[in-house]
Amino acid sequence: MTVNNGKTLVLGAGGFIGTNLCGALCARGADLILFDRFFAQEKAQRWQGQAQLVTGSFDGETDFDSLTEGVQTVYHLISTTCPTNSNMDIAAEYTDNVLPTVRLLDACVRNGVQRVIFLSSGGTVYGKDHTGVCREEDDAFPISSYGVQKLTIEKLLYLYQYLHGLDYRIIRLSNPYGPHQRPDGVQGVVTTFLYRTLKGEPIRLYGDGSVVRDYIYIDDAVRGILAIAQDGAPRRLYNLGSGQGTSVAQLIRLLPEVTGQTPVVEHLPARAADVPVNILDVSRFHADFDIGAFLPLKEGMRRTVDFFKNAEL
């Protein structure tokens, strides 16, 4: 079954991952429908003539039947919250993310959508009760409601495949960074640290810097997503990351080397939602796909610095 020649709907197309993914899909000649709350002027101009842009609220009254009409592949990248603030309003995770996804999946079934690609969270769904290296087979007990809603949507995809034959792929992505990520947002420690160091602004260190994460450059993340989305993917669930762990303290020590400037560090209390160690086991991905080596963290950081300098930020 081939699902790459019909229309492709990207939910969350205006965000960091969506912007980079859509660029790759456009380069492949995909017939795109791009959905988000809004599109910055620069992005709207970039996609003008290459894609149909639709604005709306995912947690509102979006007509998913109209949105998915004639669509063969859906990339579901949307989440209305992030891990650090999701526990403040747990009910909203379900009303704003899970329930709209149910409406979306119902529309996919009615319109004969062939495959849904869901971007889950390798950094949050596993929780903290593991060895530090997370495998797809491990039990998942998130400590943030963000992770719980991601895991809930994973289970819904399994249910809809069982009930209706709706094909899907789940990608548990680690921590992506790089061009087009908001440097002043609440996610993306690598991009934020680089940007603030270049600007001479203080970076915020929560706790003692011992938190370990798996960082993946955005171009590698997009290559991985597209590989998993293809027909040949033999399994429906994949971790996607570098497979390497880096502590926040190690990351800070790299900043002078790649920026040429010494960061100013603002020390703050540790956050309860931060899992101490999270590294993804990506052996399943590399066993099934041969797309070459991923970029080392230091080189990805250098490329992100070059992007900022070329953008004159």
Image (tube, helix red, strand yellow):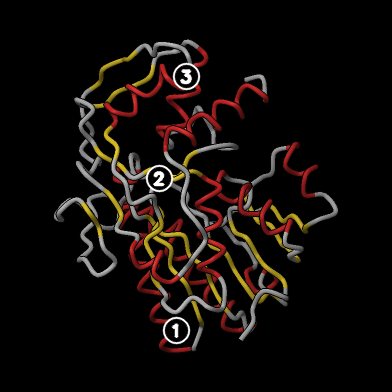
Where 65 sits versus 125, above or below? below
Q: Position of residue 275 (x, y in %)?
A: 22, 44
Disc 2 crowd rating (10 Å Cα; few below 14, some 14-19, many 20+) is many
Q: Amino acid at mark 2?
A: Asn
Q: Which residue does the numbered mark 3 point to in the structure image?
A: 196
Q: Earlier in the sequence, mark 1 or mark 2?
A: 1
Answer left or right for 71 relative to 269: right
Q: Amino acid at mark 1?
A: Gln
Query: Are the two marked residues, 3 and 2, in contact with CB atoms closer than 8 angstroms?
Result: no
Disc 3 crowd rating (10 Å Cα; few below 14, some 14-19, many 20+) is some
Residue at left offset 42%, top offset 37%? 297
Q: Quadrant of the N terminus?
A: bottom right
Query: Are the two marked residues, 3 and 1, in contact with CB atoms closer than 8 angstroms?
Result: no
> Helix, strand or loop at disc 1?
helix
Q: Which residue does the numbered mark 1 point to in the structure image?
A: 161
Q: Which residue does the numbered mark 2 point to in the structure image?
A: 175
Where 62 sits versus 277, above or below? below
> Helix, strand or loop at disc 3?
helix
Q: Amino acid at mark 3?
A: Arg
Residue furthest out toward the right: 49
Residue at left offset 40%, top offset 65%? 285
Q: Earlier in the sequence, mark 3 or mark 1?
A: 1
